[in-house]
Image (cartoon, rainbow, N blue to C red):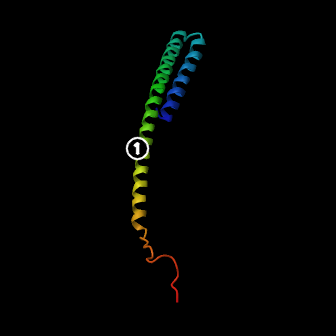
Amino acid sequence: MPLIFRILGYGGNGILFALGLIAATANDAFWPGLFMIALGGLNLYIIRKIDIYSREESWLETELHKRELRHQIAELDRQADAETQAAEPKRIAPQGGTEPPQS
C-alpha cells in the first residue's frame, strides 16, 4: 500500500475513532459516539489487514524487479566483454626468437 494511503487510512480513521470517544463521553451523544468508535475501529482493522497483505505483495514485486535488473546487468556485462575483446588489437609474436641480430 502506498505511503499516502497508509497515512490517510490510519490518520483519518484514528481521528474518527477519537471523535467517537469524545462524542461517547458527551451526555447527549452516547449512541452516535459508540457507532463512530465501532466504525473507526473496524476501518482501522481493515486498513491494517490490507497493509499487511500488500507489504508481502510489494516485497515480491520488488524482488522480481531486482531479478530483472540483475539479468539486464549480466547481459550488458557480456556485451561489454565481447566489445572489449573485439576492439583489442591482435598482437603478432616476432618470428625467429627473442635474440638480437648478430653483426
Above or below 63: residue 24: above
Instruction: Give the residue furthest to the bottom.
Output: 103
Q: Which of these two is toward me, 66 or 52?
A: 66
Q: How many marks?
A: 1
Label 1 sits on a secondary structure element that is helix
Where is residue 86? Give x, y as percent.
Answer: 39, 65
Where is residue 93? Give x, y as percent.
Answer: 44, 73
Where is residue 48? Give x, y as percent.
Answer: 50, 23
Q: Determine which quarter of the picture holds residue 22.
A: top right
Where is residue 36? Give x, y as percent.
Answer: 51, 16
> Is the residue marked by circle 1 packed among few (<14), some (14-19), or many (20+) residues within 10 Å?
few
Circle 1: residue type = Glu
Residue at 42% in and 36% down: 61
Residue at 47% in and 35% down: 2
Above or below 24: residue 15: below
Q: Which of these two is toward me, 93 or 43?
A: 93
Above or below 22: residue 79: below
- Residue that badge 1 annotates: 68
Residue at 43% in and 31% down: 57
Residue at 50% in and 30% down: 6
